[in-house]
Amino acid sequence: KGYCFRIDWYGDAFSMLYRQQCLDYCRELELEDCFVFHKAEKNILSIYQQADVFCLPSLFEGFPNVVCEAMSCGLPVLCGNVCDNGRIVQAGVNGYLFDPREVGEIANTIIEFIELPEERKRELGAMSRKIAERDFSADSFVGKYIEIL
């Protein structure tokens, strides 16, 4: 749709065949400059710190640790409205949710984020951090666990 941005894709979970299919598809669509595929990274904090937004278009997630990690680093989150994602990401508060089976909806959500004023992007990231501190801290976790018991 004419927007220029870069997607850094991390992980070793996909096979070499799938990776090659992704690379070929990017080449076919002339998007090689937009997608960069990386191996899994142990120092993930530095990766989050370089990002503007975290996007997780998975079709299935339990309770996604990567979303919690991104939020704790103060990133706005764009993710599929599946499983527990809607409990973690509050649409319009710290990110946006989309139907991961609808490519157009994913694209529109990314575009909506890109078009936000920088101040609004910072507000979403700050809310992610605030929610993470409130809900994912060790004290919060232990307290909630004790309540369950």
Image: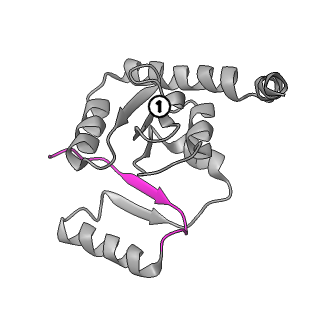
Identity of the residue drawn at 31% across and 57% down: 34
In this orientation, which residue lies closer to the viewer: 147 or 140?
147
**Main secondary structure type of the part rendered in magenta:** loop
Residue occupying image coordinates x 61% and y 37%: 68
Q: Is residue 117 above or below residue 65?
A: above
Residue 41 in which image quadrant:
bottom right
Residue in the picture at 63% in, 32% down = 72
Q: Residue furthest left?
A: 1
* Residue at position x 26%, y 67% in the image: 26
Helix, strand or loop status at disc 1: helix
In the image, is 12 to the left or to the right of 140? left
Looking at the picture, tell me which residue is in the foreground, 138 or 114: 138
74 over 27 or under it: above or below: above
Q: Is residue 15 left or right of residue 18?
A: right
Kindly indicate the quadrant of the structure image that contains residue 108: top left
Is 62 located above or below residue 132 in the figure? below
Q: Position of residue 111 (x, y in %)?
A: 25, 36
Q: Is residue 127 magenta?
A: no
From the top left corner, tell me how far across and down residue 42 is, in percent: 68, 58
Q: Nearer the viewer, residue 34 or 55?
A: 55
> Residue 95 appears in which quarter of the rendering?
top left
Badge 1 density bin: few <14, some 14–19, many ≥20, Cα 10 Å: some
Q: Is residue 119 left or right of residue 39?
A: left
Residue picked out by circle 1: 86
Indicate the position of residue 23 as horizontal and vertical percent values.
32, 72
Magenta stretch bounds: 1-14
Q: Amino acid at mark 1?
A: Gly
Magenta stretch containing residue 2, yes or no? yes
